[in-house]
Amino acid sequence: MDHFNGNTPAEELYADIIGLPHHVSKTHPPMPLLNRAAQFAPFAALTGYDAAIEETARLTEEEVFLDESEITVLNEKLIKLEADLPQHPEITVTWFQPDEKKSGGEYRTVTGSVRKIDRMEQYLILMSGERIPLNRIIKIK
């Protein structure tokens, strides 16, 4: 039988050494198991490569710009919110947050009570301290 055709059972291939005891070196102490395991750990030859690939694959959304009628409706809601500020009304607001590393960004939605509308700095400020840029808001409920 041809031993190299892949059809020979391992017992036949190694019959001459199967019964022999495991070799133990007389000059080299056995390697600790932790070091043996480290030999087979994955190796990252390019440090930061995986992070760069993840960053490239991360998707962002393009910002949607409101038309004049949508801006008017949003401004009316902000005026009503300003009138109701002493009661700290609870709202759900959606706005665009630009990405710091690449073009585009993501739309975020948060629910909270309004503390202040800062027209000078152009922020809506929630009781939680979150500051939402007025010019990025696309929806208020």
Image (tube, grey):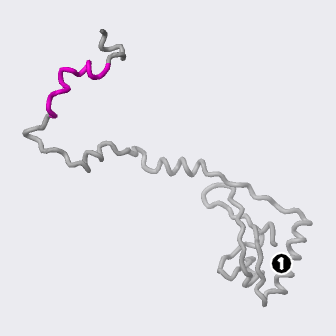
Measured from the top left, where is residue 87 in percent x and y? 78, 89
- Tell me the chief SS of the magenta region: loop
Q: Is residue 139 magenta?
A: no
* Quarter of the image where one finds residue 123: bottom right
Which amino acid, mark 1?
A: Leu
Outermost residue toward the right in this view:
69
Residue positioned most to the left: 26
* Residue of label 1: 78
Q: What is the tally of numbered marks visible in this picture?
A: 1
User: Eyeballing the image, is 10 above or below 125?
Assistant: above
Foreground of the two, 12 or 52: 12
**Direction top: furthest residue:** 1
Residue at position x 76%, y 82% in the image = 117
Q: Is residue 74 above or below residue 19?
A: below
The relative height of residue 122 versus residue 31 in the rendered view (above or below) is below
Q: Secondary structure at mark 1?
A: helix
Q: Nearer the viewer, residue 87 or 78?
A: 87
The magenta segment: 9-22
> Which residue shows up at 70% across the image and 80% down it?
126
Left/right placement of residue 44 relative to residue 82 reads left
In the image, taking residue 63 as reference, residue 52 lies left or right, namely left
Sort mark 1 into few (<14), some (14-19) or many (20+) by Cα contacts within 10 Å: some
Rendering coords of residue 7 (x, y %): 36, 16
Asked where in the image residue 6 lies, by quadrant, the reply is top left
Quadrant showing the N terminus: top left
